[in-house]
């Protein structure tokens, strides 16, 4: 029974990730209609996403530590309740400041309640096929651009009112998430014992202060930070950039969806390659491709080229994302994994926070997005350089403080 039920945990984690990330990133779809209707600046609206990522980072650390102590179910239940509430409230605000605070803080706080707890509980259920399980949970996030984003665009078109669309998405989040919460449970003793025998378990009693100063944690965290700082701006502003280049609204959203579909395949492909070639070389290769394709967006001119780059971009940024959790599971013990993932996610979310604001600022200042893509590509190359410093995996190394 437990062998079968662990795939239910994977399904629950994937669905929650899809809804949480999908609703959060739906702001990219709402950006144009909100700016047109309210007269608020793109930079001002985008700063709500920046706040989102900052709060998401802080919340991720808090929720990860809470899941280690109280279990994943109570954490994701609170997150589900808050996420729907945040979107409902954001749909009713009348000022830019109120929108920034409600959307930026509450959506970020609630969305952060799912990643670290669900990855940690998933890894506790698996003593084999762990990379595949983590990739599949992460693949749920990759489904968001193919599901929530087109649905948001359809609602905006159908009701000709972004407020109604955002309200309905908030209610929909409750409908999907609240029943799914009750599928989440801790593994039976046998599965937990298997997880305890996994790499990293011999470091279970190392103090967190030492863990956070170790080269394993520092390289993992700062690579994740630079990776997310590189791709967040291009992801968030892709729809607006495509429309700026003359692509129609629904076609522009379809580019976002193609990225998501490619990311879904990329997560599985990179997971298989990591099992065959090793996690670190696959991660470094993916980061290098990501930097190159971001730079290539500066010369894109038509929908076909957008689609081609979306396949490569989505496949690479989607593919590398689960590898950070796999490396964390290799380096650190299961009983502190939620805390470690929360801390790593906190830094990655701070990296994600730079892109939306930088892109909005670049467009407001120069009336184009070229500088966003050039700067993001350079940051992506920085992620490659940091990743080259990854220490050997635990089977060949005892955890050492930095």
Image: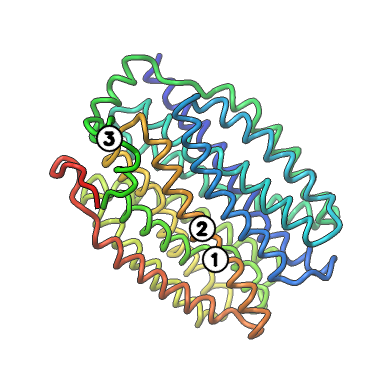
Task: Give above or below for 371 relative to 153.
Answer: below
- Residue at left 33%, top 67%? 288
- Residue at left 48%, top 37%? 64
**What residue sits right under mark 1 in the picture?**
354
Query: Seen in the image, is 28 located left or right of residue 351?
Result: right
Task: Give above or below for 320 relative to 292.
Answer: above
Query: Seen in the image, is 183 located left or right of residue 83?
Result: left
**What residue sits right under mark 2 in the picture?**
350
Whether label 1 touches label 2, CB < 8 Å: yes
Residue at disc 1, secondary structure: helix
Of the residues under marks 3 and 2, which one precedes in the sequence?
A: 3
**What residue sits right under mark 3 in the picture?**
206
Disc 3 from disc 2: Cα separation = 26 Å
Q: Which of marks 3 and 1 is in front?
A: 3
Across and down, in percent, residue 347 comes to: 45, 54
Neighbour tally class for label 2: few under 14, some 14-19, many 20 plus, Cα within 10 Å = many
């Amino acid at each position: 029974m437990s062998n079968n039920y662990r795939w239910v945990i994977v399904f629950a984690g994937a669905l929650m990730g899809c809804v949480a990330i999908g609703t959060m990133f739906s702001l990219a779809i709402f950006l144009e209609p909100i700016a047109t209707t309210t007269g608020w600046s793109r930079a001002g609206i985008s700063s709500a996403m920046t706040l989102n990522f900052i709060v998401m980072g802080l919340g991720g650390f808090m929720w990860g530590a809470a899941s280690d102590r109280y279990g994943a179910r109570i954490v994701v239940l609170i997150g589900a309740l808050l996420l729907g509430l945040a979107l409902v409230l954001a749909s009713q605000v009348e000022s830019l400041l109120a929108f920034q605070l409600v959307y930026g803080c509450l959506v970020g706080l609630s969305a952060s309640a799912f990643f670290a707890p669900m990855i940690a509980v998933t890894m506790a259920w698996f003593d084999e096929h762990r990379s595949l399980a983590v990739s599949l949970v992460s693949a749920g996030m990759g489904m968001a651009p193919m599901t929530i984003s087109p649905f948001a665009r359809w609602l905006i078109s159908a009701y000709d009112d972004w407020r109604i669309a955002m309200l309905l998405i908030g209610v929909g989040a409750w409908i999907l998430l609240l029943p799914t919460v009750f599928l989440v449970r801790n593994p039976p003793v046998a599965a937990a014992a298997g997880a305890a025998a996994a790499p990293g378990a011999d470091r279970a009693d190392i103090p967190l202060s030492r863990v956070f100063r170790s080269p394993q944690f520092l390289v993992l965290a700062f690579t994740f930070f630079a990776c997310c700082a590189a791709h967040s701006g291009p992801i968030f502003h892709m729809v607006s950039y495509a429309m700026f280049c003359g692509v129609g609204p629904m076609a522009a959203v379809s580019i976002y969806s193609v990225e998501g579909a490619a990311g879904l395949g990329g997560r599985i492909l990179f997971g298989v390659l990591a099992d065959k070639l090793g996690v670190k070389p696959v991660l470094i290769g993916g980061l290098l491709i990501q930097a190159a394709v971001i730079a290539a967006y500066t010369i894109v001119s038509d929908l076909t080229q957008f689609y081609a780059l979306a396949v490569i971009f989505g496949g690479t940024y989607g593919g590398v994302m689960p590898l950070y959790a796999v490396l964390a599971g290799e380096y650190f013990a299961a009983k502190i994994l939620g805390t470690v993932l929360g801390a790593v996610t906190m830094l990655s979310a701070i990296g994600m926070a730079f892109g939306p604001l930088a892109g909005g600022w670049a467009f407001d200042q120069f009336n184009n997005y070229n500088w966003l893509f050039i700067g993001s590509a350079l940051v992506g190359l920085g992620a490659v350089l940091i990743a080259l410093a990854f220490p050997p995996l635990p089977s060949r190394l005892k955890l050492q403080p930095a």
